[in-house]
Amino acid sequence: MVPERQSGVVILGFTVYPLQLVYLIDHKVTK
């Protein structure tokens, strides 16, 4: 495995996860 690619996936996960959390919370608040 290429370390650069793995770190890119980790960064992607760290950026997507909080966005999903914010989206879920926002969806619950608006409803």
Image (cartoon, rainbow, N blue to C red):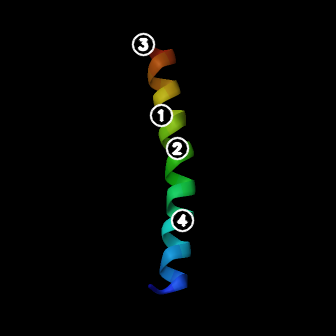
Amino acid carrying label 2: it is Leu
How far separated are the C-alphas under marks 4 and 3?
32 Å
* Residue 3 quadrant: bottom right
Q: In this view, which residue lies farthest toward the front?
A: 1
Residue that label 2 marks: 19
Observer-nearest of 20 and 4: 4
Q: Quadrant of residue 15?
A: bottom right
Residue 8: percent from left, percent from top? 52, 73
Of mark 2 and mark 4, the one earlier in the sequence is 4
Q: Are marks 1 and 2 in contact (CB under 8 Å)?
A: yes
- For the residues bearing labels 2 and 3, Cβ distance under 8 angstroms: no
Label 1 sits on a secondary structure element that is helix
User: To which residue does mark 1 refer?
Assistant: 23
Q: From what the image shows, is residue 19 above or below residue 25?
A: below
Please, what is the three-letter code of the amino acid marked with disc 4? Val
- Callout 4 crowding tier (Cα within 10 Å): few <14, some 14–19, many ≥20: few
Residue lying furthest top: 31
Q: Tag 4, which secondary structure? A: helix
Q: CA distance from mark 4 to mark 1?
A: 20 Å
Dots 4 and 1: beta carbons under 8 Å?
no
Q: Position of residue 18 (x, y in %)?
A: 56, 44
Three-letter amino acid code at disc 1?
A: Tyr
Task: Mark 2 or mark 3: name the one nearer the start of the chain.
Answer: 2
Mark 3 — residue? 31
Residue in the image at 56% along x and 74% along y: 7
- Taking the image as shown, residue 20 lies to the left or right of residue 15, namely left
Query: Does 5 sit above or below residue 28?
Result: below
Which badge, 1 or 3, comes first in the chain's sequence?
Answer: 1
